[in-house]
Image (cartoon, rainbow, N blue to C red):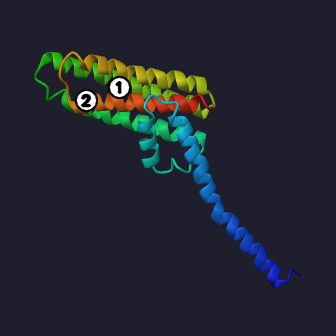
Amino acid sequence: MVPFKSYLFQVSILGVILFMTPSSNAKASSKIINDICAKTRVPSYCLELLESTPGAAAADLKGLGKITLNLARLNATKTLGQINSLIPKTIDPKLKEIYKTCYEQYDDAIGDLKDAETYFNQGDYDGRNTKASAAMTEAGDCDDETTKQTVDPSIKKGNLDLDHICSIILAISNNL
C-alpha cells in the first residue's frame, strides 16, 4: 500500500506536469507559426492571420495545414459570392465580363482547394502544393482582369487574401 504522503507527492508532480505542458506546447506552436510565416510572401499577414485563428496556436504543422486550407476555401467562397452578387448589379458590359471571368476563376480555385485537401489527407504534399499554386494562380488571373477597369474593392482584397493564404499553405507543405 502506498503511503498517503507519497500518493499526494505523485499527484502534485502530475499536476505540475499537466499545468506546464500547455505552455510548452504553445511555445512550440508559436515557434512553428513564426518559422512558417517567415517563409511566406507577407510574414506579417501570416502572423496576424494565424494568431487570430482559433486553434492555430495549439496546432502542429499538419493541423496548421488543415486550418489554412479551410481559411483559403472560406476566403475563395466569400469572394465568389461577392462576385456573384455584383454580376447582376453591373450595368457596364466590360465590367460585367470581368466579373464573369473572375467568377469562373474563383469557381476553379475552389475546385483546386478541394483537390488540395484531398491530396493533403492522402499525405501527398506535392499534389497539395500543385493545387494550392493553381488556386493562387486563379486569384492572380482575376487580379490581372481587375486592372483593366475599376472594380469593387472587395474583389481586389479577396484576390490578395487568397494569394497570401495560399502562400502560407505552400510554406507549410514544404515543411511536411
* Residue 63, quarter of the rendered image: top right
State the residue in front, 50 or 86: 50
| Percent coordinates x, y for residue 89 in the rendering | 14, 29
Residue with the most extreme bottom position: 4
Instruction: Give 110 or 16, whichever is nearer the viewer.
Output: 16
Q: How crowded is mark 1: few (under 14 residues within 10 Å), some or many (20 or more)?
A: many
Q: Position of residue 133 (x, y in %)?
A: 47, 22
The residue positioned 52% from the left and 49% from the top of the image is 57
**Which residue extends farthest left?**
91
42, 7: nearer the viewer:
42
Left or right side of 49 for 88 = left
Residue sitting at 42 percent across and 38 percent down? 44
Q: Do the residues labelled 2 and 1 touch (CB within 8 Å)?
A: yes
Q: Name the residue under label 2.
A: 83
Residue tagged by mark 1?
Answer: 106
**Residue 161 at what x, y percent from top left?**
36, 33
Q: Dot 2 lies on which element?
A: helix
